[in-house]
């Protein structure tokens, strides 16, 4: 197997020689170019494992070269060598298709990690990768096809990705797929729910701490950044991070280093940052609840995960995949949906998206004696509009989802309108009545999730912190 050389583009011969010597020590051959024109000529004459380019060149700049490589040599990773602290340029380089960036003065461990990631990256997605993404993001709608294509592209980069989508739409699945298709796939993938960590412990959880740094710190602890070294860290529900922590997170991302609580030493980290939320970060920035500079830093590449109601043609494929997985878990025959059942699912808005579809099918199977599921067997979630109400506009879903019927914890979507399900007469105040409804809904959700509070919060579409507050407010005790 021929090992391709690395192309170093810089107008300062001393820097080119220094990088070339470093590459040689790491076992990689190199070639140099001192101008933009010379670099383009070399790139059109042969292939390179990686191109390292300075920002400023005598006849142009590195951004122009990155754009050229993206079009003329799409299989060649390119990294920008940026002046220390010039993050605007680095972000622009990533947006134009750069694989990664290095700050001057170049650190040997950072250069080594970058080269290792670049040379192990295949020129294109393999058949195995394509099969993997097809299984995880099933369907043939235009929206899901575009999402899969985008994930394949961003997996080749080291750029931070911001994943926007409603609760239950599959944001974490997308993040894990980006990791598994990248050069980091053999390193750890760590997902953290930012809203589930108490504010006073966030810094310790992220960066670790030294023994004795605070009360209860009886031993050294490795944080999430260090645990994900060489791999990928997903900051789920990043909008829930306290403002004080946002400042420290921004610095860690920009400097590629962290400082454990109670330590005086910086630790270099090689972590790709992915972030996700169902909230509108732009609105939170306007309200002063999320830092604009951090949003700018994590939103280098934006990935939108479409809600299930916008790709109803994929429901049959997704449902078949879920049923196959459930059947294997339960060690029963393969469950199958009738045509009428599929039509009924397609007529439902699924405000909880794929997670709600999975819960609906699990609930149906648990209470169904048949492996052939008819439309009357489907059991939808309490408080959601039934398939007969599918004329409801998408922007009214949240309002519809708050219509509770407190007498039943699970309601069959086919229950006749003249059934015995009625709201009880209200004797007390409206607040007491609403609290009773909320208490019954939360208790039903807790019971369904076997009192797993993290899963319960996800199913209810609220943060873990919000669930904890409601449990305390409603005096619900395990």
Image (cartoon, grey):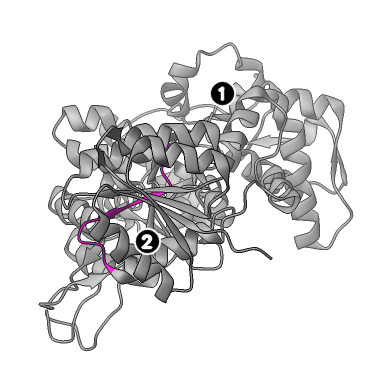
Residue at 14 percent across and 51 percent down: it is 247
Please identify the quarter of the rendering in which residue 331 is found. Answer: bottom right
**2 or 1: mark nearer the eye:** 2
What is the x, y in percent for residue 340?
A: 83, 24
State which quarter of the image contains the N terminus: bottom right
In magenta segment, residue 329: no
Q: Nearer the viewer, residue 62 or 154?
A: 62
- Side (left or right) of 106 relative to 153: left
- In space, the residues marked 2 and 1 are separated at their CA atoms by 42 Å
Tell me if I can see residue 42 in this picture.
yes
What is the x, y in percent for residue 328?
A: 80, 59
Tell me if I can see residue 165 in this picture.
no
Of callouts 2 and 1, which one flags the residue occurring earlier in the amino acid sequence? 2
Residue at 33 percent across and 35 percent down: it is 63
Residue at 15 percent across and 29 percent down: it is 287
Q: Nearer the viewer, residue 179 or 203?
A: 179
Please identify the quarter of the rendering in which residue 140 is found. Answer: top right
């Amino acid at each position: 197997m021929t090992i391709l050389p690395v192309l170093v583009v810089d107008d300062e011969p001393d820097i080119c020689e220094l990088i070339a010597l470093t590459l040689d020590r790491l076992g990689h051959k190199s070639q140099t170019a001192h101008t933009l024109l010379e670099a383009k000529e070399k790139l059109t004459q042969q292939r390179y494992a990686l191109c390292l380019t300075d920002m400023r060149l005598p006849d142009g700049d590195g951004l122009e070269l990155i754009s050229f490589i993206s079009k003329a040599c799409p299989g060649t990773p390119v990294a920008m060598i940026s002046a220390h602290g010039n993050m605007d340029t680095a972000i622009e380089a990533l947006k134009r298709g750069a694989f990664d960036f290095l700050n001057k003065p170049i650190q040997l461990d950072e250069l080594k990690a970058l080269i290792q990631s670049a040379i192990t990256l295949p020129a294109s997605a393999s058949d195995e990768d394509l099969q993997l993404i097809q299984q995880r993001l099933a369907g043939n709608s235009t929206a899901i096809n575009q999402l899969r294509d985008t994930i394949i592209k961003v997996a080749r980069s080291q750029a931070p990705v911001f994943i926007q989508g409603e609760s239950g739409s599959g944001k974490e699945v997308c993040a894990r797929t980006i990791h598994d298709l990248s050069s980091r796939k053999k390193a750890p993938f760590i997902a953290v729910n930012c809203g589930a960590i108490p504010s006073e412990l966030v810094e310790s959880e992220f960066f670790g701490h030294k023994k004795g740094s605070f009360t209860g710190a009886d031993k050294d602890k490795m944080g999430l950044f260090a645990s994900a070294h060489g791999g990928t860290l997903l900051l789920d529900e990043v909008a829930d991070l306290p403002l004080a922590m946002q400042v420290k997170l921004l610095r860690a991302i920009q400097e590629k280093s962290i400082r454990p609580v109670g330590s005086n030493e910086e630790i270099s980290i090689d972590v790709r940052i992915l972030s996700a939320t169902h909230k509108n970060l732009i609105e939170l920035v306007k309200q002063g609840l999320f830092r604009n500079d951090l949003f700018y830093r994590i939103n280098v590449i934006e990935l939108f995960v479409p809600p299930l109601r916008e790709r109803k043609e994929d429901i049959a494929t997704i449902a078949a995949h879920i049923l196959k997985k459930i059947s294997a878990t339960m060690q029963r025959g393969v469950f199958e949906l009738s045509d009428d059942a599929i039509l009924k699912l397609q007529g439902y808005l699924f405000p909880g998206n794929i997670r709600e579809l999975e819960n609906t099918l699990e609930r149906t199977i648990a209470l169904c004696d048949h492996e052939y599921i008819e439309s009357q067997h489907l059991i939808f979630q309490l408080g959601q509009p039934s398939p007969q109400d599918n004329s409801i506009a998408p922007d009214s879903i949240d309002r519809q989802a708050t219509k509770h019927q407190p007498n039943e914890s699970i309601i069959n979507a086919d229950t006749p309108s003249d059934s015995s399900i009625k709201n009880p007469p209200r004797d007390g105040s409206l607040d007491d009545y609403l609290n009773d409804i909320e208490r019954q809904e939360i208790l039903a959700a807790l019971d369904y999730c076997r009192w797993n509070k993290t899963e319960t919060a996800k199913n209810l579409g609220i943060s873990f912190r919000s669930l904890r507050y409601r449990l305390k407010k409603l005096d619900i005790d395990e």
